[in-house]
Amino acid sequence: PHARRLRLSHFEGNAADSVCFGDRVNAAIKMENWSLLPTQAHYSAVMPGYYMRGSLSGMTQFPQVLGQTSKKNKCDNLLKELLNHMIIHVNADKRQLGMEYLPLLKRKLHTPLTDKEADGVPEVLNLMAEYDLQREDWDTIMELSTFSPGVNPSTLLSTKTKTAFTKQYNKQTHMTPYALESAATRKKKAKSAGAEEEGDLEEDEGDDDAMIKPNKPKKAAPAKKPAAKKAPAKSRAKK
């Protein structure tokens, strides 16, 4: 098995080198060296296929692979946004935040609600205020720090506790050193506003400065009707 794996690694290296040569030839083709097209096809398609020829042990599950890639990108964006919210309180990069901070924050933000239910809400809110966390960040921490086959802790809380948590959070005033609107929210608003862009364009032009009142067009004075001509008086007949 070791010799087989070593032989496979040799073929993989040759295929990778061939693809690199193909990229270099492709760069030369962009300089109008069209005669190199067969050479580029040879290095980029024929030789890699020759080195890596064979069959797969099972069917490739492309939908599953694409779904996992999409999930990975989503978690990466959530972790990046969470780091932006906590950046002035932590000394870590995105990887350190996920591996070192989130497991501890998960326990600190969830255990009081599990043990004390609604009575543990103030303790959780105080910790969130220390790290400038939003209500959505609580859900993000629970999601990112839960690994398969684990269960998301938020699903274990009662509806009464979740409602009390959300209500008390909304009652407080939260001073944060960052914009409260996330990139995802701005993207959704941009999409919804795109349909109304034409209708709002005229209103935006008129509302550039709310302190300046637009001049109202003066109504044209009604045209005077011409005076009716008097009929000439009839002369009386002489007797």
Image: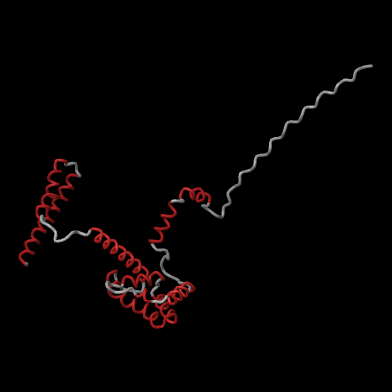
Query: Would residue 17 be found to the left or right of residue 190 on screen?
Result: left
Residue at horizontal 92 percent and vertical 17 percent from the top:
238
Looking at the picture, tell me which residue is in the foreground, 19 or 51.
51
Q: Position of residue 71 (x, y in %)?
A: 29, 63
Give the colour scheme shown.
Answer: secondary structure
Query: Would residue 59 be found to the left or right of residue 201 on screen?
Result: left
Q: Quadrant of the C terminus?
A: top right
Looking at the picture, tell me which residue is in the foreground, 54 or 135.
54
The answer to which image quadrant residue 177 occupies is bottom left
The answer to which image quadrant residue 65 occupies is bottom left
Note whether 89 is above or below 183 in the view shown: below
Query: Would residue 211 be found to the left or right of residue 235 on screen?
Result: left
Looking at the picture, tell me which residue is in the foreground, 99 or 148.
148
Q: Position of residue 7 (x, y in %)?
A: 6, 61
Residue at horizontal 28 percent and vertical 72 percent from the top:
147
Residue at horizontal 36 percent and vertical 71 percent from the top:
86
Q: Position of residue 198 (x, y in %)?
A: 46, 48
Q: Position of residue 53 (x, y in %)?
A: 10, 55
Query: Would residue 72 be found to the left or right of residue 188 on screen?
Result: left
